[in-house]
Image (cartoon, rainbow, N blue to C red):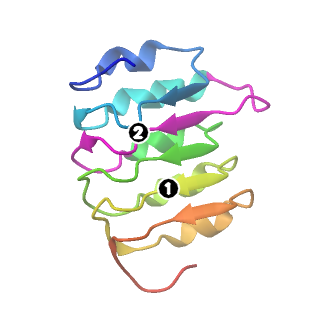
Amino acid sequence: GNIISGTMATEIGLLKNLTRIDMSMASLFGSIPSEISLWSSIRYISVVFKISLDSNFLTGTVPTELAKATPLEYLIVADNPLQGTIPSELGQLKEMVYLGMSYIGLSGTIPSSLSQLNNLTNLEFAFNFLTGSVP
């Protein structure tokens, strides 16, 4: 197979017809670019929209701009040395089915806004530093 490594280019936001991106175990590092919010122009709800960035070396925080990618159904950023809190803005992703954020060093509480994700079937926050209860 191919080996992809390096940082995610900010130009990734220009991929307007993107419906799925899987960069799992690709040796990516650096932060997740905020330009991925430009994917909000995708309005084909019947298309599965997935972002899978697990098992890389991504740092920084989970970008709040992800909430602008409204058709997003799958978000997997597990197993990265990220930090910070779970963005409450993720509660705006009404189509969200799977949210995988295990093994990334999150702290704080699980935002009550996530209780608005009525389509959510899988919620993974294992091996973080979260406190409080699940809303």
Q: Is residue 66 above or below residue 42?
A: below
Mark 2 highlights which residue?
A: 53
Secondary structure beneath dot 1 equals strand
Q: Which of the labelled discs sits on residue 100, or is there none?
A: 1
Q: Which mark is residue 126?
A: none
Q: From the image, give the main secondary structure of the stretch colored magenta.
A: loop
Q: Position of residue 51 (x, y in %)?
A: 51, 36
Q: Residue at position x 53%, y 25% from top?
A: 39
Which region of the structure is painted magenta? 42-63
- Closest to the observer, 13 or 55: 55
Residue 130 appears at what percent x and percent y?
A: 36, 77
Quarter of the rendering containing residue 104: bottom left
Task: Specify the quadrant that holds the C terminus.
Answer: bottom right
The correct choice, above or below, for 57 with respect to 40 in the image is below
Q: At which x and y percent is residue 62?
A: 35, 49
Q: Which amino acid type is marked by label 1?
A: Gly
Q: Can you say which quadrant of the picture contains the N terminus?
A: top left
Q: Are marks 1 and 2 in contact (CB under 8 Å)?
A: no
Residue at 34% from the left image edge and 33% from the top image edge = 34
Q: Is residue 129 above or below residue 39?
A: below
